[in-house]
Structure formats: structure tokens, C-alpha cells
Image: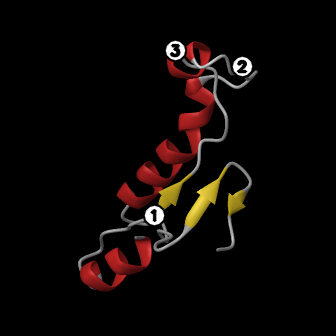
Amino acid sequence: MPRYGRSALEGDRIAVNAVTPGPCNTDFTTELGLTSQRTAVQGAAIAVQLATTAASPTAASPTAGFFHDDGSVPW
């Protein structure tokens, strides 16, 4: 999806990325019997980071990528 979005929005200064929050402890995962030490806030951090970087007019915004806490995920 990000690659398609990149070509469709190229030149519009709109970044399109995908993120993975990793396993997080939420009501949904608890109901499924899954547990994690990671909170939903911790899982959301990479999405917030990319969204605020993209909003900065001076930052070089990454686009057409797949990211997690440690950076870019090859795919």
C-alpha cells in the first residue's frame, strides 16, 4: 500500500507509511488470552513519531516505508 500511495501522491508533500506497533496489552488482546508487557501507548509511539515528523516543514519525511520502534523494516 505505501508504494502505491507514494506514486499517487508524489509531489504533494504527503508521506504515506505503514507501521507495526508490535504486540501490545489491550482489551482486545486480553479477551483473546494474549498478554504483553508493552502498553498501547508504547505501541503507538512509532506512528506518532512518523506523523509528527511528516508534519514538520523542515524535516526530511520518510515515505513509502514500513517501520517499527527500531526503524525501517525491509519488505
28, 5: nearer the viewer: 28
Residue 70 percent across, percent down from the top left: 74, 54
Q: In what element is the residue under mark 2?
A: loop
Q: Amino acid at mark 2?
A: Thr
- Report the residue at 76% width, 21% height from top: 37
Alpha-carbon distance for marks 2 and 1? 27 Å
| Mark 1, residue position | 17
- Report the residue at 36% width, 56% height from top: 55
Residue 31 percent across, percent down from the top left: 56, 14
- Report the residue at 52% width, 14% height from top: 27
Nearer the observer, disc 3 or disc 1? Answer: 3
| Mark toward the start of the polypeptide (2 vs 3) | 3
| Mark 2, residue position | 35
| Residue contact between numbered discs 3 and 1, judged by CB atoms under 8 Å | no
Which quarter of the figure has residue 32? top right
Q: Amino acid at mark 1?
A: Asn
Q: Amino acid at mark 3?
A: Asp
| Mark 3, residue position | 27
**Quadrant of the frame with the C terminus:** bottom right
Is 13 positioned to the left or the right of 21 in the image?
A: left
Q: In what element is the residue under mark 1?
A: loop
Residue 44 percent across, percent down from the top left: 53, 36
